[in-house]
Image: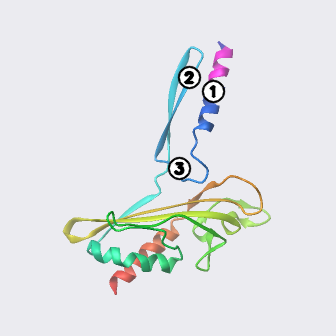
Amino acid sequence: MRKQSLSLFLITAMGACAASPPSSAPAPISSTVRVTGPGSGGQIVMAGNDPSTVHTLQYPVDKVWRALPAVFDSIGIPIAMLEPASRTIGNEAFKTRSRLRGVPLSRYLDCGSSTSVGPNADSYDVVITMLVEVHPADAGGSSVRHTFSAVGRPATFSQDYSQCSSKSTLESRFMAVLASVLAR
């Protein structure tokens, strides 16, 4: 019995590692791992992280949509995806290091820290995903879905990307710049 339990544990651990998403992609909403072993089986559901926030604005969809390129330019993320039919704009793989439009990345991201270098976000190769979708909302307003995530890895070592967590400051800055552009 003890041998079966150990085998099931090892299979479960290996299955969980093998089922993790590629290190260059943000975590999915959730994933399911099916585990089978001698005489037993099961499944594990692992919750992911949805890096999206939704804001409702009292401006028409078309006005918000037209303002978004200026906002992306203002924060320093180039537009690599523009889908007018779905009103989706952004960049799914913007690579940067150290700063974003002159601002240290550690102000926006937590990628851990090193005793010799300080915040890793300021020295790592970082890949940012920032997408914005605009949809109609009640009373002629707009619903803005803002998705932001990032992964990073040391610039000088061969290592996989690991998830960085947002400090929510870039998202707040993005929405503040958007509000400013819309108010003009």
Residues packed near mark 3 inside 10 Å, few (<14), some (14 to 19) or many (20 plus):
some
The residue at the far left in this view is 139
Asked whether disc 2 touches disc 3, contact meaning CB atoms under 8 Å apart, the reply is: no
Marks 2/3: CA distance? 24 Å
Highlighted magenta segment, given as a residue range: 2-9
- Residue 15 percent across, percent down from the top left: 60, 32
Question: Residue at image x 47%, y 75%?
Answer: 72
Question: Residue at image x 28%, y 69%?
Answer: 142
- Residue 17 percent across, percent down from the top left: 63, 38
Q: Which mark is residue 27?
A: 3
Residue under label 2? 36
- Residue 144 percent across, percent down from the top left: 35, 66
- Residue 24 percent across, percent down from the top left: 60, 54
Q: Inspect the image, locate mark 1, and give the three-letter code of the amino acid beneath it.
A: Ile
Helix, strand or loop at label 3? It is loop
The one of 30 and 112 positioned closer to us in this rendering: 30
Magenta part, dominant SS: helix
The C terminus lies in quadrant: bottom left
Quadrant of residue 16 within the rendered picture = top right
Marks 1/3: CA distance? 22 Å
Q: Inspect the image, locate mark 3, and give the three-letter code of the amino acid beneath it.
A: Ala
Q: Inspect the image, locate mark 2, and give the three-letter code of the amino acid beneath it.
A: Thr
Question: Residue at image x 51%, y 74%?
Answer: 78
Q: Which mark is residue 11?
A: 1
